[in-house]
Image (tube, helix red, strand yellow):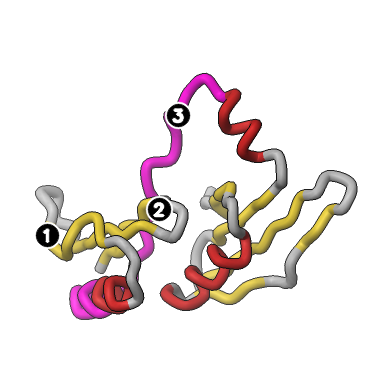
Amino acid sequence: MKIEHVAIWVSDLEKMKDFYLKFFDVHSNEKYYNPKKGFSSYFLSFKKGARIELMHSPDISEFMEKMDSKLGLAHLAVSVGSKKKVDALTESVRNNGYSIIGEPRTTGDGYYESVIADPEGNLIEITA
């Protein structure tokens, strides 16, 4: 078994796609649009591993407000291959005006990582 993709509801589909394309080594499919439902999405693919699906629907805010629980996905972790690359990507994100939630460090369980927030506040661990 493997994780095929992780889906994220977003408010600004184009802005979110541009963020992930800029900072992570992904490529995007053509935008999918279902006019009947007003649903649109992009699949962002890494060279290896799971994909990210960014999804938007005009009524998603209503749906999210009706949910009883806010429990769910805590963060997405992306391995970049080395401590040097963690540091460099973290600085690139910072220099482009995005939030660094956790500075690069070695965690108690031995991971070297930083934590950033994408434009809509989703947390991303950048790991070595």
Q: What residue type is labelled 1?
A: Thr
- Dot 2, how many residues are within 10 Å of its Cα: few (below 14), some (14-19), or many (20+)? few
Q: Is mark 2 on a helix, strand or loop?
A: strand
For label 1, the residue is 106
Whether residue 5 is visible:
yes
User: Percent position (x, y) of residue 54?
Assistant: 60, 56
For label 2, the residue is 76
* Residue 70: mark in rendering: 3
User: Percent position (x, y) of residue 30?
Assistant: 74, 72
71 magenta-colored? yes
* Residues rendered magenta in the picture: 67-88
36 displayed left or right of 28: right
Foreground pick, 13 / 20: 13
**Can you say which quadrant of the picture contains the C terminus?**
bottom left
Q: Which amino acid does label 2 sit on?
A: Leu
Foreground pick, 15 / 5: 15
- Dot 3, how many residues are within 10 Å of its Cα: few (below 14), some (14-19), or many (20+)? few
Which of discs 2 and 3 lies nearer the camera? The answer is: 3
Query: Which tag, 2 or 3, sits closer to the chain's start?
Result: 3
44 displayed left or right of 96: right
Discs 1, 3 touching: Cβ within 8 Å = no
- Dot 1, how many residues are within 10 Å of its Cα: few (below 14), some (14-19), or many (20+)? some
User: Percent position (x, y) of residue 32?
Assistant: 77, 62
Which of discs 1 and 3 lies nearer the camera? The answer is: 3
Residue 17 occupies quadrant: bottom right
Query: Which tag, 1 or 3, sits closer to the chain's start?
Result: 3
What residue is drawn where x is 56% and y is 24%? 67
